[in-house]
Amino acid sequence: MNEGIGTALMRHLIAECDREALPSQVVMAPPESADWFRRFGFEAQGELVRYTGGRHQQAHLAEVVPAGPEHWLAICHLDRRATGEDRSTWLREHDYLSRVWLEQGRVRGFLLPLAGEGLIIADHPAIGLELQRWLLPLKDHITLPTGQPEVHEHLVKQGYSPALAFVRMVREASLEWRAGMVFGW
């Protein structure tokens, strides 16, 4: 056999996913591990950058309200639009302190501060930036996909320093990843 425990575990995981007919697998790989995951058929779908060391701005818009039961269908829908995945069960497990951007009764963004490093999904950059203002007093960093120059510029202006954190990698069926909707991961 002559393989490491990580390789053996990955082969077992892939066999189990194939046996269960799971259409795709997603991993957030450290950059130095991306080649290892490629050996198993994972393909890079984008990079995520961690911003640290800055000063947050105060949240101030009244559109951000605590998430209630009536918002969860919209939260799950927005997340699926952004990630291509149905993560509704996982999202509901992290509902404590959750917030939504509510505009004329419609959820246009959400913040789950306990999901990952603080999950923020929004359909517009201004909404994502405001939801970041609710997260950054609780966290000393924020992680988000590359390719959002407006958000990058805003965070750097606030004194945050970017560093590559993860490579999003997908195996099997490609998922529609809308990185422009992700303002915190």
Image (cartoon, rainbow, N blue to C red):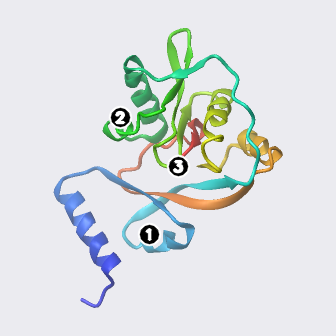
Pick whichever of labels 1 and 2 is earlier in the sequence.
Answer: 1
Q: Which residue is mark 1?
A: 38
The number of callouts visible is 3
User: Visible in this render: residue 109?
Assistant: yes
Q: Which residue is mark 2?
A: 92
Q: Amino acid at mark 2?
A: Arg
Structural distance between the alpha carbons of marks 1 and 2: 31 Å
Structural distance between the alpha carbons of marks 3 and 2: 16 Å
Q: Amino acid at mark 1?
A: Arg
Q: With respect to residue 168, does 73 lie above or below?
A: above
Q: Nearer the viewer, residue 161 or 62?
A: 62
Q: Amino acid at mark 3?
A: Glu
Residue that appears at 53% across and 49% down: 117
Residue reaching furthest to the left: 19
Structural distance between the alpha carbons of marks 1 and 3: 25 Å
Residue that appears at 57% across and 28% down: 123
Q: With respect to residue 32, does 2 lie above or below?
A: below
Q: Which residue is mark 3?
A: 117
Pick whichever of labels 1 and 3 is earlier in the sequence.
Answer: 1
Left-right relation of 112 to 91: right
Locate the N terminus and report the quarter of the image it occupies: bottom left
Image coords of residue 131 (percent x, y): 62, 31
Q: Nearer the viewer, residue 175 or 51?
A: 51
Pick whichever of labels 3 and 2 is earlier in the sequence.
Answer: 2
